[in-house]
Image (tube, rainbow, N blue to C red):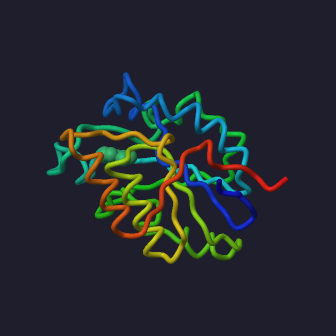
Amino acid sequence: MQTVGSGDALIVVDVQNDFLPGGALPVAEGNRIFGPLQRIMPLFPYVVATRDWHPKEHPHFKDYGGTWPYHCLQHTHGAGFAPQMNLAYVDEILSKGTMAPWHGYSAFENSDLAERLRGRGIRRIFVSGLATDYCVKETALASIQSGFETLVITDAIAPVNVSPKDEAAALAEMERQGVRFVTSDELRTAA
Ligand code: VGL
């Protein structure tokens, strides 16, 4: 069991229409995260929801020399939060990937998030959302590097798996760098 308290924050990474089935860059099993997210979001005193928020002309995209098809373009439906996510529990929305050269894989990139969370007394960060092998991984690793104890909630994440081994490789890399893993049913509050 992990008791969630005042020193804990939850980051919900990129739960956006384009990363879910039917979207532009879908995570095949993306919908599996909603049950766990609905259970855990109310437990945390501070919840940050990140969103990819890209301009079209960005080196992230194939047409501009990058890797990816267009997704999460600013102000489009695809960039919107999935309707299954209850925004009432979100304290902060953090947009990332808004400007070259930053791709915005990590919630901490080109941002003062770490300092602000520390200022709130946050010492431990729990990471959930999409996708395991990109933005969840980079956010969890940056959280470790920023000095937070970091836990990934394994039933509240799902991978893109461009290659079928990407999920396992991402989990192994996170473990190697000190990320710990919990499931949503291991979390509770003290009260
Ligand atoms: C992501 C691939 C490309 C993610 C973002 O949110 O994990 N994956 N851009």
Residue at 60% over, 34% down: 85
Left or right of 87, for residue 56: left
In this view, 143 is above or below 83: below
Residue at 72% over, 44% down: 42
Left or right of 147, for residue 5: right
Left or right of 63, for residue 174: right
Residue at 58% over, 76% down: 115
* Snapshot quadrant of residue 62: top left
Q: Percent position (x, y) of residue 168?
A: 28, 48
Q: Percent position (x, y) of residue 153?
A: 51, 49
In this view, 49 is above or below 111: above
Residue at 55% over, 68% down: 113
Q: How many marks?
A: 0
In this view, 140 is above or below 37: below
* Snapshot quadrant of residue 5: bottom right
- Seen from this angle, which residue lies furthest front? 1
Q: Percent position (x, y) of residue 11?
A: 56, 54
Left or right of 33, for residue 188: right
